[in-house]
Structures are given as structure tokens and as C-alpha cells.
Amino acid sequence: MKVRGEDARHARPRRSSSRSQASPPKAPATVLVRTPRRCQTAIVLAAYQEALVALSTDAALRRRFKADPKAALADYELSPSERAMLAGLEPARLEHYAQGLIEKRWRNLARVWPCSLQVARNLERRYRRLVDREPPQAMDTPLPPGPAEALRVLPRLRHALERDAGSAPYAAELLCFETFGGSDIGSSSGDSGGGFFPSFFGGDSGGDSGSSSCGSSCGGSSCGSSCGGGCGGGCGS
């Protein structure tokens, strides 16, 4: 029955069931995020730099690159132009550049280990062989390049010196002593010298501080006395 006139305003609307009122759930809207062009460029450059750094530091990768450049770069997410650019590098020039980086790294180490070089004549050869097997990795550290690299290779080189009959019997302890900056020996070269760690951690740069650090790391409490005697004989000449 239709309601007309004044009665229409007082008439109650007919209620429908909740099922008929409910609307089907809507699919979530797809959100498109646009990456800024500069961010895309940074991502591309990061992949390119990662491959270039690996070629410059990893000797095994360079050997693979020399044999087959495309296969050596297959694991890196590079654009066709970047892949072609890296594949066009001359292996001889790449090797020359890599050896220059190793030489620079070794000079930083030599300032940390001045006395160890006197009592372990083959230390440089051992380091270069170690870098060939275990290339350095990029890391975030407050340490200068010399002490940071010395810490990285210390366990392997110390173990090798302990078994080396041609080196002084205290060579391994001396290497540890200088790595942790337990003496003022070699610290005159600035932030790459052996005295960096005591000053960085707020300790004394004298022999006592170095002895405790070296003793805890090398496993010998007599490291300070052994290194001190060895250094006096080795560096005095």
C-alpha cells in the first residue's frame, strides 16, 4: 500500500536483511611505487662497483676472468652495457692494478710490524700468499687500514710463524704484540703505527698494556717480555 501526503514522512522504511545489505569485500588496491631515477642509478652503480672491487681483490676471480670473462661475471646483476664494459677490461692491466692495491696494503702493514719484519724475513711472502687465498672484504671499521688488515690476517700468520723453524722462536708473539700496539715501536708513523690500539681504547701505550692485550690474544702471559727482548735484538741492528 502506498503512503501519501503527511503519512509518508512518518512511515518507517522497510528493513532488508543484513545479507542483502552487505557488499562483497573489495580487493586491496594495488599501490605502485615509483623508484626515483637517482636511486635506480645508485643500485646499478653498486652492482657495477661490487663486480669491479671483486675483480681487483680476488685473485681466483681474476684467473677465471682471464679464461672466460662472461662466465666470471655471470653471478653479478649487471646491465648489458656494464657487463660488456667489464668484460672488455684487459686482464694484464687488471692484474697490474690489483698488485698495486696489494702493495699499498702491505706498506700499511709494514708500519704496524716493523720489528716482526726483522725477525720473520718471509713475513711479506706469507702475507701475499694469504691474500691470494683469502682476499680482503669490505668492512665498516673505525680502525685505519694498517691495523684493520693486521687484525684480519693475524690468526693465520701467527699460526704459520709458530710452525716456521726459520723464524725467531718469539716471532709469533712479537707479531701479536705489535698488532695490538703494546709498544711505542713503530708508532711514529702516525695513525698506522703499532701504538694505535692503546690510544684508541683509552689505555696506555706502554709495555704493560700491550702485554695484557697480546697475552690474552696470543695465549701467553709472557708475551710482553718475549716480544720486548726480541724487539731489542731485532730492531737494534
Image: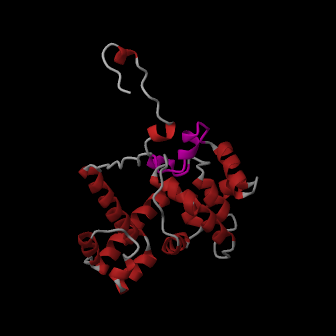
* 98 lies left or right of 121: left
Decide: is 227 above or below 51. above
Residue 232 position, x and y percent, is 62, 56
Tell whether position 42 is magenta. no
* 40 lies left or right of 236: left
Q: Kindly indicate the quadrant of the structure image that contains residue 218.
A: bottom right
Q: Nearer the viewer, residue 237 or 225?
A: 225
Q: Main secondary structure of the magenta part?
A: loop
Tell whether position 196 is magenta. yes
Q: Seen from this angle, which residue lies furthest right?
A: 221
Q: Kindly indicate the quadrant of the structure image that contains residue 173.
A: bottom right
Q: Nearer the viewer, residue 148 or 50?
A: 50
Q: Is residue 119 visible?
A: yes
Q: Seen from this angle, which residue lies furthest top?
A: 6
Q: Seen from this angle, which residue lies furthest front?
A: 1
Q: Nearer the viewer, residue 206 or 197?
A: 197
Residue 40 position, x and y percent, is 29, 55
Q: In what quadrant of the picture does the C terminus appear?
A: bottom right
Residues drawn in magenta = 185-205
* Residue drawn where x is 27% and y is 79% of the image: 90
Decide: is 233 above or below 123. above
Residue 58 position, x and y percent, is 44, 72
* Residue drawn where x is 61% and y is 38% of the image: 203
Q: Seen from this angle, which residue lies furthest bottom?
A: 67
* 150 lies left or right of 39: right
* Residue drawn where x is 33% and y is 62% of the image: 49
Q: Kindly indicate the quadrant of the structure image that contains residue 63.
A: bottom left
* Residue drawn where x is 41% and y is 49% of the image: 27
Q: Nearer the viewer, residue 9 or 170?
A: 9
Count numbered badges in the picture: 0
Decide: is 199 above or below 90. above
